[in-house]
Image (cartoon, coloured by chain):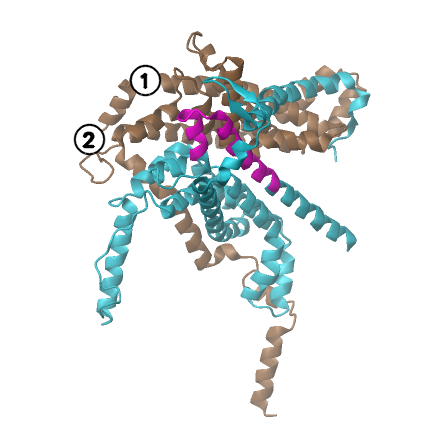
Amino acid sequence: MAEGRQAAARRPLVFAAFALPTLGWLLAFFLVPLGIIWLYSVGENVSLTRVETTWTLSNYARILEPEILELALRSLRIAALATLVCLVIGFPMALVIATASPAAKPWLLLAIMLPFWTNLLIRTYALLNILGTRGRLNEALGWLHARLQGTLELLGLDHPGLMSEPFRPFTFLGTETGVVFGIVYVSLPFAILPLYSALERMDKSLLEASLDLGAGQLTTFRRVLLPLAMPGVVTAAIITFIPALGQFLTPDLLGRGQVDMIANVIERQFKGANDWPYGSAISMILLYATFILLALRAFADARRSAARDAR
Amino acid sequence: MTHDDALAIAARTRANVVNPLRGRSRPDAFDYSRRWSLRTVFALGCVFLYAPIVVLIVFSFNDSRRGGNVIWKGFTTKYYAKAFANEELMLAFANSLTIALVSTVFAVLLGTLTAVLLWRFRFPFKPLVEGLVTLPIVIPEICLGVALAIFFTRMGWMDTGGLAWPLNLSNITIAHITFSFPFAALVIRTRLQSFNVETEEAARDLGASEWRVFFDILLPHMRPGLVAAALLSFTLSLDDFVITFFTSGPNTVTFPVKIYSMVRFSVTPEINAASTVLIAITLVLTWAALRYQRTWKE
């Protein structure tokens, strides 16, 4: 289409007018700052305020200290778990939006987007009110527990051992469960949107063909729907996983200092410990992880389109 | 083979053979949104997304001093009065709005240039530039926050206490422009895709200059995209905590940063009230965006 229809060389001045502000801004306030933390990550503190680039790798080596390593593994575990939960909840939700009537679709999308536009800190703070031992979630679970017990009694199934114990509230704050809950809560809209756009674009006749040829709903889901939606699933996974891995607020507020993730260690190097080279090195590791994930996705995309061309 | 057997086999094969009428008699294969099981999942998902926010709003009216989020003690609006009387909070609020306004103007400007650049031109290393422009969106917030914090410190721009308002907010504003203009560019570029190039060519044939083509033809077409981009940038700026937390000097506090320090101190209905005000602003902005879109379509 009209995309990229004009060679830059033909109108160098107009091109420069459009290109220079953007590139200048990115260079000054994005690439240079990233370059500086890269230099800091191989530098050392020489005085309270000065850092010298000594090309040392000791900042990176410190990541292998058991304490930090455990924390990094925990971050990976929490982010992976939260991503998985987001995909499992998000897929059916995206499916509902993608197949809704054209009149309902914008409203359903809005319902998903509205929390996403609400301040992240406020949403996390809102969870803080819900997740306490005496919070609303435990209240709701206790209510459910009592109803279930009542039903079992009615059915004459109130044997000891079968939900006979009184409800014990869960501890969410300061536990990994609470942090995963919080990350799922803030990133669910992120996961739903790419899933939705993949499902939306899908060729619906393929599903009908599968059902008409005798495959059941489950087989159709597993063999047709899921493979077709796979690019969206991968995008959703990456777009959820990367911010989840670098989450600062959720572990900070809901983890209560007991479920620290990588970002909390970074924050401490800048706000407390004043070890900027070390903080920079951990930030760089987060960045490297991001780049690796993005490269993997680009690679997968290239392979998929190559396979399509070969056919 | 009995008659019944034959009927049974016929019935079974009928179900398995492609039947042009079948697709019509049963519900559409892709009608997942009509399934009750999936509808329930969607509804529960929405309850999950909204319940905490609703509880927060409800308890901002709770007449209880501490731990006010557990037991309902009666209706009051005094915590709103308290929040509005809190001078530090109001200053932080004014700071946030100023930063959001200024960074929105710049983000839309830069976003427009970026979108037109990528949409119109063919140039060497274009994929690289495209990747670079999306990078501020994809990298973890904390990395950008840390990088800008060190950068500002090295440049001596971190302690802005001596500067007059609103110049003391420059570093936070720069940080906000950096992460919001790529979003603006994305939105505007999507809008450009529906542009009919022939109108531009016609204008050129009739002797319009590059300048006039941009202002009289391209810009009016982009307008809905510009408004959407502006609203998005404004919301992003108003919402940001992590990057602001790192790039703000000791004397410049934004609304989310102030709320954060209040939350760390204790959980009070006053924070609920302040949060509710911010949620209300988000709602009004969204409503305005929807209204605008509708009038534009008509």
Q: Which chain is cyan?
A: A
Q: Chain of mark 1?
A: B
Front one among A170 and B27: A170
Assign the magenta stretch its main secondary structure. helix
Identified at 25% across, 49% down, the residue is A139
Local crowd size for mark 2, using a 10 Å CA cut-off: few (<14), some (14–19), many (≥20): few
In the image, residue A265 above or below residue A69: above
Q: Chain of mark 2?
A: B
In the image, residue B283 above or below residue A156: above
Q: Which chain is brown?
A: B
**Does residue A140 appear anywhere in the picture?**
yes
Identified at 33% across, 42% down, the residue is A174
Residue B213, magenta (yes or no): no
Question: What span is in magenta?
Answer: A264-292
**Does residue B180 appear anywhere in the picture?**
no
Q: Which residue is mark 2?
A: B65
Mark 1 or mark 2, earlier in chain:
2
Q: Position of residue B222 (x, y in %)?
A: 63, 26
Q: Which residue is mark 1?
A: B88
Name the residue at the left extreme. Answer: B73
CB under 8 Å between callouts 1 and 2? no
Element class at badge 1: helix
